[in-house]
Amino acid sequence: MGEWVRLCGREELPSESEAKEFCVRGHTLCVATLNGKPLALDNVCPHRGGPLAEGAIEHGKIVCPWHQWEFDLATGQAKQAATVKAMTYPLRQQDDDVLVEI
Ligand code: FES
C-alpha cells in the first residue's frame, strides 16, 4: 500500500487529451486528462526510456515521442508488446488538490 501525496492543484491538470509532466517524491509522472478524468503513468517509457509526457494522445493512448509505441492511459498496456506495461499511479481529488498514491 502506497502513500497518498499531493500531486498538484486541480487547476494545474492538463487540458483534455493533453499530457503534462509532474515530479513528486523522486518520481516523474506523465499525467493526462481523458474524458474528464486525470490519469497518471510513470513518465519513463518502458521501451527505452523516452519521456511519455512529451508524446501525443491518440484514441486514449499516449504515443511515446521516441519510437511511437502506444500505451493505454488507464492500464499502461503497450500496444506493441503484450508483456510490456508502463506503471500506472492511482489519482484522487480532494478539495482543490489532486493526490497520487506512490
Ligand atoms: S522509448 Fe518509448 S517507444 Fe521507444
Image: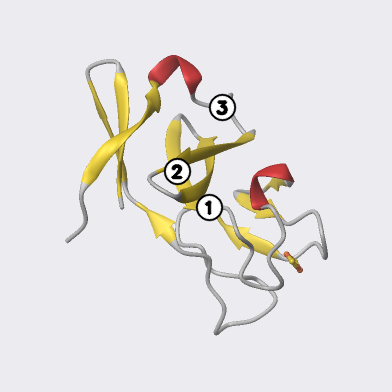
Q: Is residue 58 above or below residue 82?
A: above
Query: Which residue is identified by label 2?
Result: 39
Position in image of residue 16 (x %, y %)? 58, 28
Q: What separation in Å lies between label 3 and label 2 (alpha carbons)?
A: 10 Å
Quarter of the image for residue 67 reads: bottom right
Q: Amino acid at mark 2?
A: Leu
Position in image of residue 35 (x %, y %)? 49, 34
N-term mark: 3 or 2: 3
Q: Badge 1: how crowded within 10 Å, few (<14), some, or many (20+)? A: many
Labels 3, 1: front one: 3
x 22%, y 17%: residue:
95
x 65%, y 44%: residue:
53
- Ligand 1 falls in quadrant: bottom right
Q: Badge 3: how crowded within 10 Å, few (<14), some, or many (20+)? A: some
Mark 1 CB near ligand 1 (8 Å cut) = no
Q: What separation in Å lies between label 2 and label 1 (alpha carbons)?
A: 7 Å
Describe the element under mark 3 as helix, strand or loop: loop
Q: Amino acid at mark 3?
A: Pro
- Left/right of residue 59 with respect to residue 12 in the rendered view: right
Q: Which mark is residue 14?
A: 3
